[in-house]
Image (cartoon, helix red, strand yellow):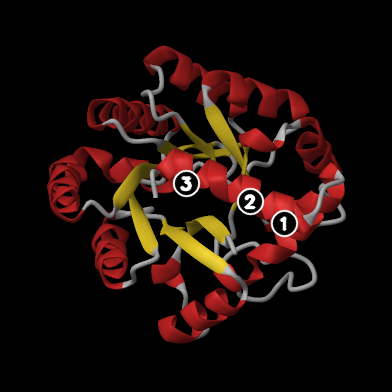
Amino acid sequence: MRGFIDTHAHLAMLEHASLSEVLERAHQSQIEKMVTVSVDEKSWEANRQLAETVPNVWYSLGLHPHEAKDWEHCQGRFLQAYGLAQKNKRCVALGEMGLDFFYNHSDQDVQKACFIDQLKLAQQWNLPVIIHCRDAFKETYDCIRKVGLGPRGGVMHCFTGNAQQAKEAVELGLKISFSGIVTFKTAQELQAAARSLDLSHMVIETDCPFLAPVPFRGKPNEPSLLPETAKVLASLKGVSLDEIKAQTSQNAEALFSI
């Protein structure tokens, strides 16, 4: 029987339990595959080692917009990290990258420059992109239009926008990834966006250890909780849980070639 795919986890960040415990619970919840996502220089190596150790885990390389201020100084080491990734073939995407104009931990122009550089590398290396966007949909889409996506496209991670913003992302060649946020009672606009999308454009994620779904909200998140998000999407779309599992897993496998 086909399992779920957690397209966006931060496995190297989990502290509430041992990795073996987390992986066992994931197995019990039918989590078949996971992508552990990098956000900063420290996580590049941690995720590479994890993906080389655990057969059903792959990883990404990227610099989060919060850390964009470091891009100028770490580009050389980023290229070295990609060189290591080429040896094991476990790196399946670049990201997470993008724009975050809510926190603005890095200057907005610096964020844009870092994002554009990573988009260009994704084109050069023929990898899909994992995009973080908060309070910056217009600017994020403008950057993508300016540079373009490679043939592998990408995904709007932890999507929080409305139906029109989801439609625009799909038209740009991006999948829409739903996290535990879609289970929140206050997420009515996001739920409407989910209803508006065809299943062929959807993937699911935990973004663990963040954003645990209802009824675990406020607790540490982990891949084993992914089915809670899938259940809500099944209800929103009026389809079975098995159909959500099958279609989102098929979409994830095609996106990341896993």
Residue at (41, 46) in percent of width and height = 64
Distance of label 3 from label 1 (alpha carbons): 16 Å
Image coords of residue 233 (percent x, y)? 77, 50
- Which residue: 81% across, 43% down? 191
Q: Is residue 30 above or below residue 254?
A: below
Near-viewer residue (165 or 27): 27
Whichever of callouts 3 and 2 sits on the residue coming sooner in the sequence is: 2
* Helix, strand or loop for disc 2: helix
Disc number for residue 242: 1
Q: Nearer the viewer, residue 124 or 212?
A: 124
Q: Label 3, label 2: how many angstroms apart (C-alpha)? A: 11 Å
Residue 166 image-quadrant placement: top right
Q: Amino acid at mark 3?
A: Glu
Q: Quadrant of residue 163?
A: top right
Disc 3 residue crowd, few under 14, some 14–19, many 20+, Cα 10 Å: some
Label pair 2/1, CB-CB below 8 angstroms = yes
Q: Which residue is mark 3?
A: 253
List x then y, in percent, for residue 21.
49, 86
